[in-house]
Structures are given as C-alpha cells and as structure tokens.
Image (tube, grey):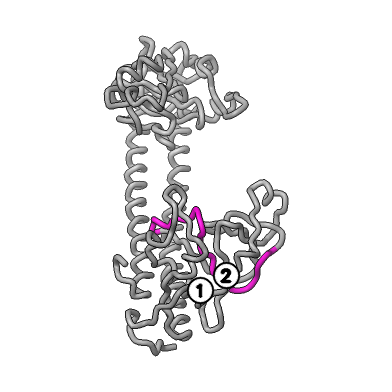
Amino acid sequence: MKCDDSLPPSWPVVPLGALVECLDAGRVPLNRAQRAQRPGPVPYHGASGVTGHVDQALFDGALVLLGEDGAPFADPTRDVAFFHEGPLWAGNHVHVLRPRAGVDGRFVAHALNTLPYGPHVEGSTRPKLTRARMNSLPVPCPSLACQRLVADRLDVSLQRIDGQVRLLDRLDELAREQVQAIIAQAMGAACGTRRLLGHVFDITGGGTPATTRAAYWGDDVTWLTPADLPPGPPGWVTRGQRSLSAAGLTACRAIMVPSGALVVSTRAPVGRVGLGCGPLAVSQGCKALVPRGHAVDRRYAALALWAAGPELRRRAGGSVFPEVDTLTLASLELIMPPLASQRRVAQVVWTQLEQVAAQAAERVRLEGLLHEYRVAVRRAAMGAGPEA
C-alpha cells in the first residue's frame, strides 16, 4: 500500500469531533470492590488504560478511549489515548469515542498521543479534558489509505519498542529475585549466636512536629520517614525529603542518633532498612538502632534486619495499618557471628548489591531512552516535530 498524500505537514487538520462519535452517555463507573464482585473476561477501561476485567460489556467494536480526568496529560512518554476493538466496559474517567466512516481509530489514537494537552485541559490538581474541549482537539486527517498505512507502521514500530521495555522490566524482576537470593544465602550460611535485637541495639523512636508550623521545618536536622528508606535492599541514606529545624526536633521530642545508625520502617510499610550517613532523627513510622557496645558491623546488621523483614511483617499489629512497636522489634532475633565474619559477609554481599544496583541504573537509563524514542517515532509519523 502506498500513501498517496504528500508529506504530513500538508495533511488537513480537523476537530476531533468531526472524526468520532462520543459515546460517553453509555459509561457506568465501577469501583474496585464492585469489579471484584463480577469477574469476567471483558476489559474495564479507566483514564490510563485497562484496570481490571468484568463479566459483561457496555460497548463493542472499534473504539478510541481518551482520558477525561486523571490521565497523564503532562507526561509525553505516557499514552492518554488508546485504541480498542471488541467488548469493553468503560468508567466515567475516560471518553469513549467511535470512529466515523472513513476514519481509522488506530490513527486517531496515535495522533491524540502526540498533542500537547496543556492548552486544552482544565484544573491544576486533577487536570480534566471536558467534552467540549475534547471535540475541538486538532487532529490530522489524511486519506483513509494513508491513515491505515501510518497506523500499520506505527503499530509495528511501537510494539517492538514496548517489547524492549517489557524485557527491561523482566530483567528488573529477575534482579530483585537475585538480590533476595544473595542476601538469603548469605544469612542462611551465617553461623553465630542468635541475639535479641534489643540486647544488641538501643532502639529509639521518633516523631513529627506540626506540619502547619513553618518554624519547625528547615535544614538543621536530617529527618527520615519510611518513604526515605530504600524500597529494595538496605542502602546508605544521606537526606530525607524534608528536614527539621532545631525547634521542630524539640517540639516532636525526637532524639538525634549518631552517624551510621540503622533505621528500620515500622509502619506503612514495615521492614525497609537504611544506614544513616550522618546524625539524624526519625518520624514515628521508623525506629533508629544504635549498637549497644557490642561488636557489630553495621552493614551486616542492616542485611540481617532486612532479611528478617517477612518475620517482622508477620508480627506487625494494628487495626488501621500494620505497625511494629518497640517491644516487638526488640524481641526479633538475629544471627550474630564474630565481628570478622560479619565484616567478610557484609563486604561480599555489599559488593554484589552495588553491582546489581549499577546494572539497574543502566536499565533505568535505557528505558528512559526507549520512552523518548517511542515519542519521537510517533511524532515523526504524524509530522508533529520534536516539540509541538
């Protein structure tokens, strides 16, 4: 097939409403609990894609789904429009559009994913694309033959790129499994006395001053919350997202601990572990651990504590969210070999973790380049240029 139109910049541009019929009146929202009560094979579509499956359809046929509110309008690397063919249930956060005669829905979805939405959406905290503004979106409209040719080529190119992204994601999953295996193997092979955590470390809690008092917040005191700790294996932590002033530290009655203290999250989520690079204080969602005069390699202790995370989570209580209190944490047992063995294990494992982390950082870089390339391929096909 050959596209008989001239270069993309000469394609006519028409309002989206001239190319599609809006079926929004047929949408019915279902929350997660409602979807769970009616499982089935039919995709349930939200603002950013399929979020589940249900037992029956509201729509069928070739459709273009375009986010109404909650879609990533400000992120050009993420799609806000999707082409779907077949049965579908759609909630009220996505516009449901049926292509008119002579219009390829795949081409329309690709075109919509190249538009800058800033001038078209309303609202600052949750941008919304109203139906009126949606209908006026400018969309290129070459001949149907050219639409199909462009859509065919883009489908193939983007599927290849998406396949590479999925491969990188799978490699990340394997790397996480590798990290768990490395630490589990090291801890499983460790030989030594089982010691209660509370016998080896002084355990200190924390607090949070009033967030409305500006005088309590500043750069004087490093202050860590569960969100500041590594979500994966333990690592060094230099700063938190926020810091306290001296007045804030006094107000929340948190206690400063010295550099090198272990910090473990004991609330939402339980079991993250970090090592402080410098003196710090913690929120009530964490506990800080300082060796109590025993021969302890902090890196080894951090690995052992992280490996004990499943047991710590099993012991967590609380009615609102899982939480571990000081007594429960103190009763956790860790295997503590002689100091020389601790250091040897820590050095080997830490070196392996640094290698895995470097590989993960490279995968993140490559994935970012793939997303940028995906945007560029689509924009070039639509004649949108690099920064439309």
Q: Can residue 363 be seen in this view?
A: yes
Quarter of the image where the N terminus is located: bottom left
Q: In front: 247, or 259? A: 247
- Say few, some or many: other residues with alpha carbon within 10 Å of mark 1 (under 14 / 14 to 19 / 20 or more): many
Residue 22: which numbered mark, if any? Answer: 2
Residue 56, horizontal then vertical, whole percent: 71, 62
Q: In which quarter of the image is residue 57?
A: bottom right
Instruction: Say whether residue 72 is magenta.
Output: yes
Residue 30, horizontal then vertical, whole percent: 65, 52
Q: In front: 308, or 251? A: 251
Q: Residue at x 41, y 12 (%)?
A: 202
| Sequence-earlier tag: 2 or 1 | 1
Give SS at disc 2.
strand
Q: In which quarter of the image is residue 117?
A: bottom left
| Distance CA(mark 2)–CA(mark 1) | 8 Å
Q: Is residue 31 above or below residue 160?
A: above
| Dot 1 amino acid type | Gly
- Residue range highlighted in magenta: 57-77
| Residue tagged 1 | 17
